């Protein structure tokens, strides 16, 4: 089974700096090396660079666009098409796209980010999905720990790690364990599912 890992991060702004670009590309490479699929908002910035790193390592990516068509994606939203193997045109704008994107992923990684990243985090948090926080990347990523303390509702695993490869490996291990537990819950006695 290929796990789908969402990379959520800033599409523009101060977060888009050489250090974070390098970290985003390493996240993408690590996702590809683990045999997972990268899902993103089919956008610019850090998710774009994660998809670039993923493609360099031979991985597959799925982009969820806020637009209703390829023309709308390119002309109105001015979003890229490069490094995305399959684009899903949601037609729901940014907030609707964020919900579909996050719900389609098995786990979420936060790198820097702004309000859209926070929105994707809260959906994943409420859905109790495993979440990886790339520490020392700035923006929302550096605020998440405090937000979870304020929320008083910590029912999902949140991994904090500075190293992109270790972060992806930790999420994948958690997903494997979760998949194993779910498989056991679904199998009838004496008949494990295929």
Image (tube, rainbow, N blue to C red):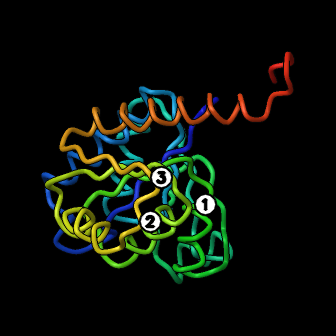
SS class of the residue under badge 2? Answer: loop
Q: CA gap, disc 3 to disc 2?
A: 12 Å
Residue located beneath label 1 in the image:
103
Residue placed furthest toward the top: 190
Q: CA gap, disc 1 to disc 2?
A: 17 Å
Q: Which mark is residue 6?
A: 3
Instruction: Tell me which label, 1 or 2, sits earlier in the chain.
Output: 2
* Rendering coords of residue 84 (x, y %): 53, 50
Instruction: Tell me which label, 3 or 1, sits earlier in the chain.
Output: 3
For residue 158, above or below residue 70: above
For residue 134, above or below residue 9: above
Residue located beneath label 2 in the image:
43
* Rendering coords of residue 127 (x, y %): 56, 61
Picture quarter with the N terminus? top right
- Give neighbour class at mark 2: few <14, some 14-19, many 20+ (Cα, 10 Å): many
- Give neighbour class at mark 1: few <14, some 14-19, many 20+ (Cα, 10 Å): some
Residue drawn at point x = 55 percent, y = 57 percent = 63
For residue 138, above or below residue 167: below
* Rendering coords of residue 24 (x, y %): 28, 49
Which numbered disc, 1 or 2, marks the residue closer to the eye? 1
* Rendering coords of residue 169 (x, y %): 36, 31
Judging depth in this view, the residue of 164 and 180 nearest the camera is 180
């Amino acid at each position: 089974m290929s796990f789908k890992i969402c990379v959520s991060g800033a599409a523009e702004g101060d977060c888009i700096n050489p250090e974070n670009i390098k970290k985003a590309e390493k996240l993408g490479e690590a996702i590809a090396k683990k045999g997972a699929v990268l899902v993103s908002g089919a956008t610019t910035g850090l998710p774009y660079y994660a998809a670039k790193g993923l493609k360099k390592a031979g991985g597959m990516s799925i982009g969820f666009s806020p637009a209703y068509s390829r023309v709308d994606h390119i002309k109105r939203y001015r979003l890229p098409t490069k490094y995305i193997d399959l684009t899903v045109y949601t037609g729901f704008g940014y907030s609707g796209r964020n919900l579909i994107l996050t719900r389609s992923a098995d786990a979420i990684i936060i790198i820097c980010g702004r309000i859209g990243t926070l929105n994707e985090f809260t959906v994943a948090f409420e859905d109790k999905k495993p979440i990886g926080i790339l520490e020392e990347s700035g923006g929302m990523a550096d605020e998440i720990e405090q937000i979870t303390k304020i929320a008083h509702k910590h029912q999902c695993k949140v991994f904090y790690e500075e190293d992109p490869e270790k972060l992806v490996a930790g999420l994948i291990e958690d997903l494997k364990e979760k998949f194993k537990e779910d498989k056991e819950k679904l199998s009838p006695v004496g008949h494990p599912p295929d």
